[in-house]
Image (cartoon, rainbow, N blue to C red):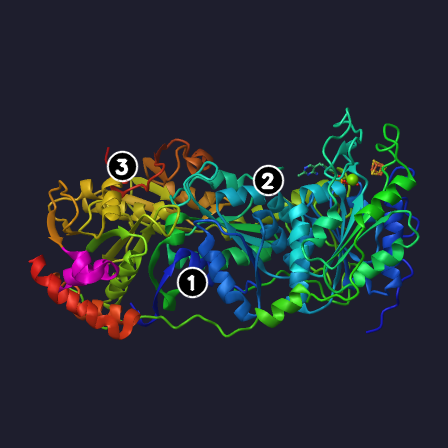
Amino acid sequence: MTTVQPKTFLKDSVAFPFCKGCGHHHYVHNLDRALSSLQLDPKKVCIVSDIGCIGILDSLFVSPHTFHTTHGRSTAFATGVELADGILNDSKLKTVVVIGDGGATIGLLHVVNAALMNVDVTVLVANNMLYGMTGGQHSGFSPLEFITPTTPEGNIVPPMDICAMIKSCGAEYVTSISATDKNLTNVIADAIAHPGFALVEIVELCTEFAIGNNKIDGKTIQAMAEQHNAATLPATFKRKEFCEEYKSKVLGHPSKIKNDALTQRYISSLHGTRRWVIAGTAGEKVQLSSYLLMRAGILCGLHATQKNDNPVTQGSGFSLSEVVLSSEEIYYTGIDVPDVVIISSAEGLKEVTANGTISRSNKQTVIIMEDSLPEITTSARIYRVPLRSMCTPQRATTSAVAAFIARELVIPIEAIVDSIQMHVGEKVSLYQDDIKKLLPLLS
Amino acid sequence: MSIQQIKIRTGNQMIAEGALHAGCQFFAGYPITPASGIYKSMIEELPRRNGVAISSPDEISALAYCVGASARGAKAMTATSGPGWSLMIETVQYALMTELPVVIAVVQRLGPSTGGATQGAQGDILLTEYCTSGAYTIPIFAPSTAEECFEVASLAMFWAEELRTPVIILSDKEIGMMSEDVNFSSLVSSPVNYRKQPVNNDTDGYKTYNFKSLADVPLFSPIGGEHKTTITGSAHDKGGSLQKNSPETIEVLRHLQKKITSRAEEMAFVKTDDDPNADILIISFGITARTAREAVKLARKQGMRVRLVNVISLFPIPEKLLKKAAKGVHTIFIAEENLTGQYRSVIQHLFAGTIVIGINSFGKMITPNDILGCITL
Ligand SMILES: Cc1ncc(C[n+]2csc(CCOP(=O)(O)OP(=O)(O)O)c2C)c(N)n1
Ligand code: SF4
Ligand SMILES: [Mg+2]
């Protein structure tokens, strides 16, 4: 399909909404000339604008897609557009972010992240050193001593050099230029043409709020742009654009979803519900033992739920699991009175004491606990066994689960052995030995 | 029961499965307990199905990436919990205003603030529904089992596309992080759909937000497509031009609400455990609905006549279904895991003349005995 390249992307004879002399006039004209000079199909151009005086330029454009977004977030929306375009559609859309210094202040992280990713977005920061639309308040880009309604004594915080900052994020096309520089069209065009992240800081004047109280003119602005542009663009660009990188490294690997569907192989004599609490120390396979128990139940056609708990830091302190097995659909997933409690360590004991598991246990409850732990008071039936020394701390809870199943025979022992074997393979024999040793201690 | 298709899954994993089944193409995430499981599942699986699953530097970016991708035509989703949700709110409002479909799974935990990361709660009902400046209805669906997570994810994707609007899946820590047996042979899903698009030859007449009747959903054309799109979060006319309070702009704003409320009855979805002669009604949702089901089982053993309604479509409020369920009962109990009875506060006006009592808990799950204790008093 051939498209006629328009001379301008702007609407005919529409008045710009900016104050007289506002630097945004230069910004819009140069952006338009840059787009035309690149001979882009307007349907393959998206202007993502931010909030502020600069943000309303979207209404001036007639042919490209326009996306007028929220304060500071334009670069994030643009990143989303580009990701969907470059990876899902391969259509080589050119996405240009139009953002002020205010937007770049509140939304800095979005610019940083787009630069880190090297996504093909061009960010054109209209830096007039203040929040124009809201009445000229200072921004993170206001120079020292700058007088604004919110810095009546002069700004005492130095301005951000966004070029230096974004260069440090690995961005390859970063430059600063005055809005009145005659090279501006070319610079914007180069930035847009660059097949990766690009940022141009366009230093401007807000005629409404910046002048009057401040000694600022074309020369100061030129100097500021040059200072921010101290490092020149590299001779060659080395980084791969993010979508290309994603397509080559992340996309399209074969699915990892394994067929883990379970088939009923055993029959359980359980009618009703069994509620288990298993407690021990993080890193000692407590939650795994619960999973293996749950799977054994499912292998017998039972319904099962499993909930895990641990302190906020996941690798230390206690580890606790609750498993409900039932011959019927499980509605209530909590455990008021546990049927079986297994405690393999002091951390585990502390937790089941603190969370009320022990106090809620009653005569029907069986507690199997490591024999070196202190005495507990409960009406539950307690078996104190040397879980840690007999089975090793790593196998303690799983072997206790399996031994209790072997003793009770409500779930056939083969089901839990099968479930363990599915996880550890040949090493299941170690667990079978544990069961043999534990079984006499549970009668 | 066909045992062949039983898999052990968490609710979070099933939300991911449901979204993938519904054709989700884009996911952006940021870690937060108890929602991280959805993020992890999508990162693992979506790129393998040639979709994009991306990590963002914060929740504002996560949702903005999704909305940007949606504007480019992708079916998009993100997931978070209360603290991340509060960062997303401005962007949800934006998606609503710009009529860009997106699904957000909010997996509730104990608040306020960062609260209890590993403790369950149902305290974000009003925070999610009433988050918009301007008071618009956001469809919210709440699952109560891992299987329903699949069903609800596909439902949420369906309505987001159908209505061109953000839709929320309101899950909670218990449902999200608990593993259970899921029968894959009996999973329920909605039709796989895509937002309606204009026929391509009419490029000149295209307006980004065009509609005839207020309830119509504008035809969608993506950024980068054949039609010039003019997307804006500012008050706008049908063509997307910024306008202050012109009659057409006010019409567009009213349409944003009307397109949703006019479909309320189609979205209405409750699951009823019925007793036709019930004199007591229990209303609940999410994790507490399944606890209530246990309580109802026990109550019936004691000879009580109880009906249970598990509300899946929390918003728009399924008014007709709730009123119908209340017929013939003398007392209604509304069970939810928050202190102030958030859902009760917005539905009890439906039941004038009937006693309405809240069953509430905070920081711990409601138990069947809690419910039984209340309804037998
Ligand atoms: C979240 C949010 N906070 C505050 C505002 C108010 N606001 C509108 S424009 C603006 C400043 C814009 O400044 P800048 O980006 O530099 O653009 P300029 O007006 O100078 O062109 C602010 C703070 C807003 N729209 N959204
Ligand atoms: S207030 Fe300042 S930035 Fe805004 S249009 Fe006027 S001169 Fe330009
Ligand atoms: Mg500014």
Task: Tell which subunit mark 1 falls on.
Answer: B
- Same chain for labels 1 and 3? Say yes or no: yes
Nearest to the eye among marks 2 and 1: give it.
2
Q: Nearer the viewer, residue B113 or B77?
A: B113
Is the residue B223 above or below the residue B284 in the image? below
Q: Measuring 88% from the left and 56% from the top, which residue is drawn there?
A: A185
| Image quadrant assignment for residue A359 | top left
Mark 1 neighbour class, 10 Å CA radius: few under 14, some 14 to 19, many 20 or more? some
Nearest to the eye among marks 2 and 3: give it.
2
| Image quadrant assignment for residue A389 | bottom left
Q: Earlier in the sequence, mark 1 or mark 3?
A: 1
Q: Is residue B72 visible?
A: no
Q: Measuring 43% from the left and 46% from the top, which residue is drawn there?
A: B321
Q: CA distance from mark 2 to mark 3?
A: 36 Å
Across and down, in percent, residue A30 comes to 88, 53
Q: Are marks 2 and 1 in contact (CB under 8 Å)?
A: no
Mark 2 neighbour class, 10 Å CA radius: few under 14, some 14 to 19, many 20 or more? some
| Image quadrant assignment for residue A251 | bottom right
Across and down, in percent, residue A15 comes to 90, 44
Residue, disc 1? B188
Across and down, in percent, residue A25 comes to 89, 45
Across and down, in percent, residue B88 comes to 58, 45
Amino acid residing under circle 2: Thr
Bounds of the magenta segment: A386-406
Q: Nearer the viewer, residue A436 or B175?
A: A436
Residue, disc 3? B375
Q: Measuring 61% from the left and 72% from the top, which residue is drawn there?
A: A248
Is the residue B356 above or below the residue A83 in the image? above
Q: Quadrant of the N terminus of chain B?
A: bottom left
Residue, disc 2? B132
Q: Earlier in the sequence, mark 2 or mark 3?
A: 2
